[in-house]
Image: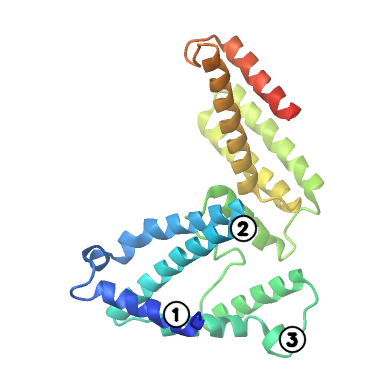
C-alpha cells in the first residue's frame, strides 16, 4: 500500500540529509546554491518538455526531479541555520491563504481577472507595509527567456488597464515598428536597427498575448518546423547522392519547397 504524502515527504527529507552528511555522497556534499543553479533551470525545462509530450509518466519523473532541487536548497538552508523545509512550507501556505481571501476569507471575486487584480493589490499592500516600493511589473525574473519575460511583464501591466484593446489594435504597432526597423536597415544604422528589432519583437509578443497565444511556444513551434523541413531537405538531397553543401542555392530552394509541399500533402 502506498504511504501517505506526509510519510513520503519525510522519507525524501531524510534521504537528502543522509546525502549531505559525513559519509554521504561526495558529489551532493560539495554542492552549493550557486553550483545548483544550472540544475534548477535544467529540471524546470525538462518538466516543460514532459508537459508538452503529454506523457504522464515522464511528467511524474520530472516533477520529482524538480522537487528534489527545492529539497536540496532547503537542506543547505538548514545547514546554514537560515531556514528549513518547514519554514519554506509555512511561508508558502501562509502566502496562499493571505492572497486568496475570496477562498479563505470574506472577499468575493467572480472572474480570473478579478482574482489576479486582487492578488496584485495584496502584493502591493504587503510591500507598502514592509516599507518597500513595488512596481506593478516587478516580480518577473531577468533570467527568463526574453519572449516569456516580455509576455509576463506586459500581462502584469494589463492588470492596471495599460494595454491595447485587442490583438488587432496591437498589430498596428507591429506594422509601425517594422517600418522603423526597415528605415534603420536602409540607413545601415546597426545600433538603431538593434533597438528597432527589439521593438518589433516586443510588439509581436503583445499581439500573441492578446490573441491568447504563448509567444515562446509559437517561436518554439516555428523553430521545430524549420528543423523538420531542413532535415527533410537534407534527406531528399542525400537520396539523390547530393548534400546541402554541394548544391546551388536555387536547388536548395527547390528542395525546400518540395519538402513543404509534401508536408501540406500529408
Q: Which of the 4 quarters of the picture holds residue 199? A: top right
Q: In this picture, is 222 found above or below 120?
A: above
> Which tag, 1 or 3, sits closer to the chain's start?
1
Residue situated furthest bottom in the rendering:
106
State the residue at coordinates (58%, 18%). Answer: 236
> Which tag, 2 or 1, sits closer to the chain's start?
1
Q: Which residue is mark 1?
A: 8
- For numbered disc 2, what is the local secondary structure? helix
The answer to whether mark 2 and mark 3 are in CB contact below 8 A is no
Cα–Cα gap, marks 2 and 3: 26 Å
Res 62 visible: yes
State the residue at coordinates (50%, 11%). Answer: 241
Front one among 131 and 230: 230
Front one among 52 and 157: 52
- For numbered disc 1, what is the local secondary structure? helix
Local packing at callout 2 (Cα closer than 10 Å; few below 14, some 14-19, many 20+) is some
Q: Position of residue 72 (x, y in %)?
A: 36, 71
Front one among 127 and 100: 100
Cα–Cα gap, marks 1 and 3: 35 Å
The answer to whether mark 1 and mark 3 are in CB contact below 8 A is no
Q: Which residue is mark 3?
A: 107
- For numbered disc 3, what is the local secondary structure? loop
Res 87 visible: no
**Front tag of 1 and 3:** 1
**Front tag of 2 and 1:** 1
| Residue 152: numbered disc | 2
* In this rendering, position of residue 176 left or right of residue 255: right
The answer to whether mark 2 and mark 1 are in CB contact below 8 A is no
In which quadrant of the rendered image does the C terminus lie?
top right
Q: Which of the 4 quarters of the picture holds residue 99? A: bottom right
| Residue 179: numbered disc | none
Q: Position of residue 26 (x, y in %)?
A: 21, 65
Amino acid at each position: 500500500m502506498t504511504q501517505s504524502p506526509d510519510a513520503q515527504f519525510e522519507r525524501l527529507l531524510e534521504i537528502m540529509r543522509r546525502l549531505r552528511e559525513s559519509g554521504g555522497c561526495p558529489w551532493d556534499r560539495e554542492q552549493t546554491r550557486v553550483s545548483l543553479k544550472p540544475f534548477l533551470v535544467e529540471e524546470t525545462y525538462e518538466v516543460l518538455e514532459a508537459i508538452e509530450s503529454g506523457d504522464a509518466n515522464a511528467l511524474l519523473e520530472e516533477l520529482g526531479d524538480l522537487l528534489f532541487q527545492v529539497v536540496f536548497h532547503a537542506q543547505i538552508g538548514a545547514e546554514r541555520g537560515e531556514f528549513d523545509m518547514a519554514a519554506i512550507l509555512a511561508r508558502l501556505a501562509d502566502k496562499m491563504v493571505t492572497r486568496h481571501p475570496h477562498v479563505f476569507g470574506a472577499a468575493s471575486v467572480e472572474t480570473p481577472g478579478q482574482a489576479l487584480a486582487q492578488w496584485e493589490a495584496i502584493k502591493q499592500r504587503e510591500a507598502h507595509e514592509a516599507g518597500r516600493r513595488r512596481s506593478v511589473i516587478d516580480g518577473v525574473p531577468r533570467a527568463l527567456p526574453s519572449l516569456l519575460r516580455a509576455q509576463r511583464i506586459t500581462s502584469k501591466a494589463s492588470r492596471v488597464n495599460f494595454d491595447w484593446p485587442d490583438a488587432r489594435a496591437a498589430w498596428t504597432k507591429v506594422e509601425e515598428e517594422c517600418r522603423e526597423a526597415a528605415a534603420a536597415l536602409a540607413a545601415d544604422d546597426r545600433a538603431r536597427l538593434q533597438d528597432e528589432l527589439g521593438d518589433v519583437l516586443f510588439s509581436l509578443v503583445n499581439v500573441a498575448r492578446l490573441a491568447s497565444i504563448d509567444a515562446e511556444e509559437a517561436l518554439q513551434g516555428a523553430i521545430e518546423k524549420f528543423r523538420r523541413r531542413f532535415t527533410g531537405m537534407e534527406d531528399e538531397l542525400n537520396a539523390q547522392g547530393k548534400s546541402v553543401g554541394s548544391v546551388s542555392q536555387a536547388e536548395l530552394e527547390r528542395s525546400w519547397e518540395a519538402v513543404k509541399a509534401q508536408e501540406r500533402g500529408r
